[in-house]
Image (cartoon, rainbow, N blue to C red):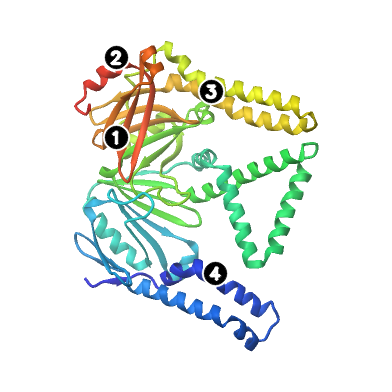
Amino acid sequence: MEYRHSHAINIVEHTSKYLILLVLPAVRALFIGNIGLYAWLQGAWFDILTIMAILLFGFLAWYKYAYRLTDDGIFIKQGIILPKHRYISYKKLSVISVERPFYLLPFKAVRLNADTDGGTHKVSDFSITVYKSQVSDIIKRASAPFINCSEIKRVYLPKNFYIAVLSFVASNSLTGVIFTSTFISGTGRILGSEFENRVVEQITSVASFIAVGVPPIAAIIGFIILGGWAVSFLTNLIRHLKFSVTRQSCNLFIQSGLVTRREYYITVERINLIELRQTLTTKMFGLYTAFIHSNGYGKRKDELSVLMPSGEGGDLVQNLKLLLPEIPICKSELKPRLKYLSRFLVPPFWCVVIVSFLWVVCYRLFPEFGDSILYIGFMAELPCLWYLFVKIISYFHTGVGESETAYTLCYTYGYRIKTVAVPKKRVVKFVVRRSLFQVMSGCCTLVFYTYSEGTKRHIVANLNFEEAKRFMSATKYYR
């Protein structure tokens, strides 16, 4: 089969971030500046030449990037001055993702990315924008080694409530603030700084009106945090609505998205781990969220590697057995002893004490800012107390279990409560680590390393040293 080029819209994608800086000011000067065409050409001739040069570069990059499909893999050639040739075997693919942005639908274009275990965690091994009609051929050829069409399909369809729980848990105020600020500044770049300033003034006035009787700084901070979280929540909700998972043979097919549809074709044998995640809130309601780690899934910005948005423990485990029976989750055999409880509680306890001390000192030294200090101190104390409760849960949750094919690691990371099932073939090594205080108390920390597009560590702390040695010595994976 001969080499194919990507969709022609790829020329614009290559050059859009440069063109926007030149085209918009030029157009605004022509239509809003009330100047004649001849006068505009006299002043903008250099910008026009620059735009033409950028478009020429984009055309050459598009023309020199081509791919060819065979029965065994994909041949890729690229490079304007120094051509490069690459080959990706279908059997080595871990994830193929197809993104269908709404703004590309009129052009009948979709984005396709393919990843292997040998790439980098930042860039896909194969990334291209193609015609919608070409996608099915690529997917059919790439999935052929992993799918037996005669086998039955197993489908998981979550309730919308579970998707809302995922959006609630995964939402981040900082992400929402960055998204909103980028949107405002980008709009200001198009419509002018006056529009941007008016939007900011309106947001400030709304915050002041809503927060009557609250210190101004507290109102602004609270409004930013809450508003950022709300934007992030809505973004995650829209991204994951219409979520579904289908298992057939050795392939997982995941799709989601209300506005922009996303599809993922995941090779089961290249899944590195399953991660059940909880927060303190979802722990109280007995809800879990399941993620998987497979190279290429969850790689792009603001993308989550979700397997199940959320669910109750029993139902979620049953669905995991339906979709991924190769990676079982088992009970912990190694657990912390009662005498190690203090090792979980001391760090968050000191956080609470230090923040409380600074809170009181600042209130005494700067009484004129009393209201603001009370608010800031209270807001700083909340995460410390929350962390204390998480560490209490951590003592009862922490442990290590083993099945015939996988390890189950239970630990906490920050405010997250994790249960991770790792196939034994994906564990590169594990280390028994001890500090001076751990030697004195007779405990240790087990660190499991998995490697694929970078090293990932799983740290299970405060286990009995002698029990950990006996447990690890009993497995052939001990190093």
Residue under label 4, please give it: 20
Percent x, y of residue 355: 62, 25
Name the residue rendered at 38%, 21% in the picture: 435
Q: Residues within 10 Å of mark 1 (few under 14, many from 20)?
A: many
Q: Callout 2: 10 Å neighbours few (<14), some, many (20+)?
A: few
> Label 3 amino acid?
Pro
Labels 4 and 1 touching (C-beta < 8 A): no
Upstream in the sequence, badge 3 or badge 2?
3
Q: Which comes sooner in the sequence, label 3 or label 4?
A: 4
Tell me whether the residue at label 3 lies in contact with that at label 4, contact meaning CB atoms closer than 8 angstroms. no
Q: Position of residue 88 (x, y in %)?
A: 24, 58
Q: Which mark identifies residue 348?
A: 3
Name which of mark 4 and mark 1 comes first in the sequence: 4
Residues under labels 1 and 3: Cα distance?
A: 34 Å
In space, the residues marked 1 and 2 are separated at their CA atoms by: 28 Å
For numbered disc 2, what is the local secondary structure? helix
Viewer-proximal residue among 429 and 391: 429
Q: Where 473 falls versus 339 (above or below)?
A: below
Q: Residues within 10 Å of mark 3 (few under 14, many from 20)?
A: many
Instruction: Name the residue nearer the viewer: 27 or 267.
Output: 27
The spot of residue 273 in percent (x, y) is: 33, 37
Mark 1 highlights which residue? 327
Q: Residue at x 21, y 21 (%)?
A: 474
Task: From the viewer's perspective, tell me whether residue 301 is left or right of residue 442.
Answer: right
The three-letter code of the residue at mark 1 reads: Ile
**Does any portion of residue 149 appear in the rendered image?**
no
Q: Which mark is residue 466?
A: 2
Which amino acid does the dot numbered 4 rest on? Ile
**SS type, badge 3:** helix
Name which quarter of the figure residue 186 lies in: bottom right
Mark 1 element type: loop
